[in-house]
Amino acid sequence: AYHTELLARQQPVNRARLRQQSAVTKISRRALKSGTLGPLFHDAVALTADVVRANQCLLLKVTDDRQGLAPRAGYGLDWEQTESLLVPASSGFLSGRTIATEEPVIVEDFRTETQFVPDPLPDQQRIISSLAVPVFARSGVWGVFAAHTFEPRDFQQTDLDCLQAIANVLSAAIDRNHSQRRLIQNERLAGIGQMITGIAHESRNALQRIQACTEMLEIEVADQTEARDLVSRIERAQDDLNRLFNEVRSYAAAIRLERTSCDVASLWREAWEQLKSERRSRQAALRQPWRADPLVAQLDRYQMVQVFRNLFENSLSICPDPVDIDVVCHAINASQHGQH
């Protein structure tokens, strides 16, 4: 008699377990076939609600600021009304508690629960029992997968196992989707890199023609001081542009500095001079420190001029007129600071 009664009690549990295992298998197959997450999410909540006999089933994603959870799929409620809502990521709510603990949360009866309440969603007042599990991704907790009933429910271990198994399938699908997106982005960046490399190569041909013209022009204006100075500026800009194109062509390679002995003051003065056209209509002044001896260091001249120019450009773009830019510098013996 005891054996017969035990079998009678176990049969419904076994049937429920078989249905839940079948549901996990189905959603796993769909996850492998589907390339988009939206339909997979909606299939998962509908299938889960059916096998755990829930009135509602929801998948919520943690927002980027970690302050709330946004519904991504739902079953048993008005989805148009639900998808625009935001559930606070507070431990005073079911999903917030799940995020905080990173563990499954089971509530048999919210009418006697004192620590937290159901999530503020449609039909919140009708929810009596809930089962929620965290959904993980590589970066941590991605969201919450929850099932709710409108009648008291004693959730079994099989229900928890089913919900957790489907949540794990969704986690794998989310990570795979992110990996595919990163792969596509990397392919796009590689294509852009190849295109820029081609542009840089063709531009060097144009630069060579400019160089030939400036050399001829320099001969023509050899007796004109002001014109000769303008030609010298064009040549310096051309050299900088040519070097920039070379860097673009080798952007994937390690940065190599061409260090020479430089007077640092001459570098920021050159950068300031390059911005002459940008500050022509501005009330801008560069206040430099006075030093009896030059401040000399082993630097890559081109790179440091770019550094100073970027700093000056940022200052001019942010500050209203009049702009006073103070340069303050002092020497540091790198060997005394454990640097090499």
Image (cartoon, rainbow, N blue to C red):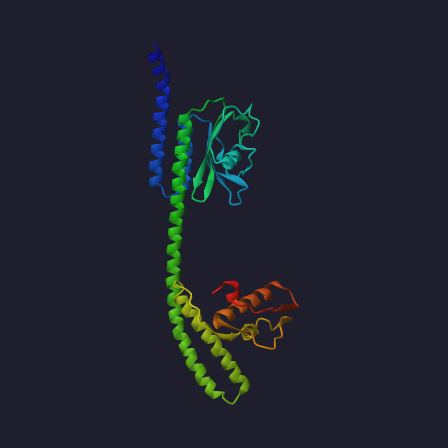
Q: Nearer the viewer, residue 73 or 154?
A: 154
- Label count reads 0
Residue at figure coordinates x 38%, y 71% from the top left: 202
Q: Is residue 80 visible?
A: no
Residue 123: x %, y % from top left: 53, 29
Q: Residue furthest bottom?
A: 223
Q: In which image quadrant can residue 168 be found?
A: top left
Q: Is residue 249 visible?
A: yes
Q: Residue furthest front?
A: 336
Q: Nearer the viewer, residue 99 or 281?
A: 99
Residue at figure coordinates x 36%, y 43% from the top left: 35
Residue at figure coordinates x 34%, y 40% from the top left: 32
Q: Nearer the viewer, residue 121 or 271?
A: 271
Residue 174: x %, y % from top left: 41, 42
Residue at figure coordinates x 36%, y 35% from the top left: 27
The quarter of the rendered structure image containing the N terminus is: top left
Q: Image check: 249 left or right of 65?
A: left
Q: Residue furthest right?
A: 322
Residue 24: x %, y % from top left: 36, 32
Residue 134: x %, y % from top left: 46, 36
